Image (tube, rainbow, N blue to C red):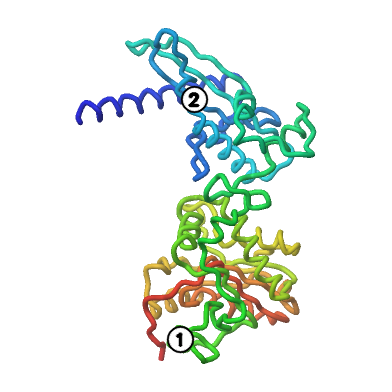
Amino acid sequence: MKNFAFLRKKHIALGRRGENFAADYLERNGFTILARNWRTEAGELDIVARKEHEIHFVEVKTLHHKEGFSPAGNLSFKQRRRNFSAGKVFLALLGSPFVTGIFDLIEIEYTQRGAFLSLKLWNDYLPSIVRQKKETENVNVPGVPENNTWWGRFLRYLNFLPCPVCGTGNGGGTGLLCDSCKSKLKFIRRDRSCPGCGGNLDGVTALCSQCLANGNLPLWDRVFSVFEHSGSGRKLILDLKYNKRTELARPLGKMGADTLMQSGIIPDFVTAVPVHWQRRLLRGYNQAELIGRSTAKYLKVPFCNVLKRVKSGSRQATLGRTARLKNLKKAFVCVSPENVAGKRVLLIDDVFTTGSTLRAAAEQLRKAKPAALYVLTISRRKALFKKKIV
């Protein structure tokens, strides 16, 4: 066991050394490194580099020299397909039609004593390999011209982007969830949704039992939640929020937009619950804003940040209901009341738990006198605490 652990550690160190050497080689040849070891459930990319209008997804294979054996021989077909899927997801996140995606392979060999021996770059190696397998016949989409221009290559790599969850299914669009992954979500029925939180009604009363227990009347005209915060739905939200899976904002925003359009609601503009600048700096983004921008895109309405969080406070997920309300007191301000007055506003957040965050944000929007205030959350979480505020 010790011997296996030692060899494994040595193998990882060799691979890291090769990747560092490959990155230095690319930079010396005019490439800009965009990412290293970029991971998604669809696959992993060792190096993502840019040169002019081309994005290069570089797979690095490093081995000690063996007579008659090439490092590329250690690259399985399954791994090649995962690299291909990960590259398409990266292009979807980039969102620019003015780039070309190219898959490269760098082979690095060292002597048995660790001295550098050779480096070989195989440019655009993947498509010719992928087309040899029947499973990847859809790489060249019917109707897309076979040419080597940047536009033709972009279309071949971009259409169709795989499902960002499983990495293999096709959601009928760029980076949307496939039917298999959608079937694992517990969608909330529109005809049996609570007007207070958007969750499923669990009784004969107008509000669900959780809203009744909390003793809160809604501050909004309509509220919608897409699915329950459990199982696969919970994992989607947590991956987007804490694991930097920002590509998930696209399918979540699409599902949110579909929910609104099915209910006949089209707002004048979309806004999102903001986070404090310190938390945004640490996380790198506001997940509610990413979902909001995606939803606005599919609704074909503008997105506008009209709220600002001026008080940091503790994380809401770690607090009870009473502490949540106290934590959010005077936390938000409406910075553009003139843009809200007389408009139909859609306020978006990722999760509805007790509604304390949304209520604090909605109170500030109400002061600006909108024509209608709608709330959309992607998931509805059943709170473990139902203490009524007196």
Between 320 and 300, the one lying in front of the other is 300
Q: Is residue 282 visible?
A: yes
Question: Relative to 153, is 389 on the left or the right?
Answer: left
Quarter of the picture holding the N terminus: top left
Residue at image point 41% right, 88% down: 389
Type of residue at label 2?
Val
Against 168, residue 288 (above or below) is below
101 vs 381: above or below? above
The answer to which image quadrant residue 361 occupies is bottom right
The residue furthest top is: 67
Image location of residue 380, percent across then percent down: 50, 72
Name the residue: 77% across, 30% down.
146
Q: Secondary structure at mark 1?
A: helix
- Spot occupied by residue 171 in the image (x, y as percentages of width and height): 63, 52
Q: Tell me the quadrant of the picture where the C terminus can be found.
A: bottom left
Quadrant of residue 69 within the rendered picture: top left
Q: Return the residue at label 2.
A: 60
Residue at the disc numbered 1: 209
Relative vertical location of residue 26 with respect to residue 361 in this rendering, above or below: above
Secondary structure type for disc 2: strand
Cα distance in 3D space between marks 1 and 2: 56 Å
Report crowding for label 2: few under 14, some 14 to 19, many 20 or more residues within 10 A (C-alpha).
many
